[in-house]
Image: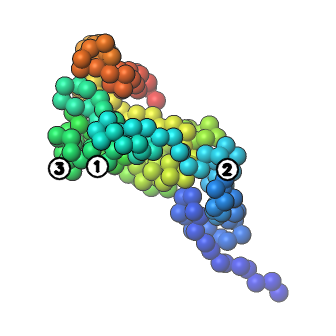
Amino acid sequence: MAVADDRQGGCEGCGRTVPLDELTVVTMPDGERVACCPRCEPHAREAARKCASLDQRRATCDGCTETYLETELADVVLDDGTVIDCCPTCMSKVPGNGSDDEDDATATSATESTGDENAADGEKNLCMQCNEWVDVELFRVTTIDDRTERFCPTCKERAESDGIVRDVDMRKTRAREVLGVDEDATAEELRTAYHEQVKRAHPDRQSGSKSAFKLVSEAYERLRDDD
C-alpha cells in the first residue's frame, strides 16, 4: 500500500510552504539554485533566460559622488523642487528626509521602497502575490514575462530582489504628493498643478532637472490613468 508523501518545503520566490513534489529547482545565471513553487517557476525561468536575476547597472550619487547600483539610489525632491539621486547614507542627511518625516512630500523617496502610505479611507487591498489584505496602496508591477500584477510593499521588494520585476508604476499616493493635489482633484485641477510643477521642473530652469521633469510627467500620467 502506497503511503502519501506529505513532506513540505518553502518556495524561495514567494516564501510559501508547498508540498515538496510541487517545488522545481531553477538554476540562475550566477549558478545559484532556487526552489520555486508553480506560481514562481515561470518568473524564475524568465529571469534566468534573460540573465536578469540581479540588476548590475550603476549610477553616481549626487551627494557623495560615489558609484552605487541603480537600485540602491533614490530620487529625493528638495524644497526648491530640485530632484537629486541619493544613496541611503546621503538620503538620510537631506533636510526633512529623516526617519521622523517619512510623510513629508518635499523629501520622500520616489522609489517608495517603504510603502507606508495608507489606502484611502481605510480601504483594504488584496495583494496578488501573498493573497493578504493590506491597508496600503498596492504597487502595479510589470514582471519580466509581461504580467501586470498588484503587490503589497513586502512582496514588491521581494520580487525586485528575486529579479522578476521589469517595471513598477508610480503609486497614485506618490503622484498626488509630487503634484501637490488632493485625492478628489478634478481633471482641470490636475492639469493646472501639472503645468505649474512642470515649469519649475524644466531642465532649462535653475530649479529644474531632467529627473524632476520626468518625475512630474510620470505623476501626471499616473493620475490620468483610471486603472
Up the image or down, 163 lies above or below 222; here it is: below
Report helix, strand or loop for mark 3: helix
Depth check: 151 or 165 in front?
A: 165
Image location of residue 97, percent across then percent down: 21, 43
Up the image or down, 173 lies above or below 221; here it is: below
Q: Quadrant of residue 182?
A: top left
Q: Are marks 2 and 3 in contact (CB under 8 Å)?
A: no
Q: Amino acid at mark 1?
A: Thr
Residue 209 visible here? yes
Report helix, strand or loop for mark 2: helix
Q: Which residue is mark 3?
A: 100
Q: Quadrant of residue 195?
A: top left
Q: Which residue is mark 1?
A: 89
- Mark nearest the camera among 3 and 1 is 1
Residue beneath the point at 33% across and 16% down: 203
Q: Are marks 1 and 2 in contact (CB under 8 Å)?
A: no
Q: Amino acid at mark 2?
A: Ala
Point out the tag, 1 or 2, that comes first from the N-terminus.
Answer: 2
For label 1, the crowd category at 10 Å Cα-Cα, with few meaning under 14, some 14 to 19 and many 20 or more, is few
Q: Which residue is mark 2?
A: 48
Q: Amino acid at mark 3?
A: Asp
Depth check: 226 or 102 in front?
A: 102
Point out the tag, 3 or 1, that comes first from the N-terminus.
Answer: 1
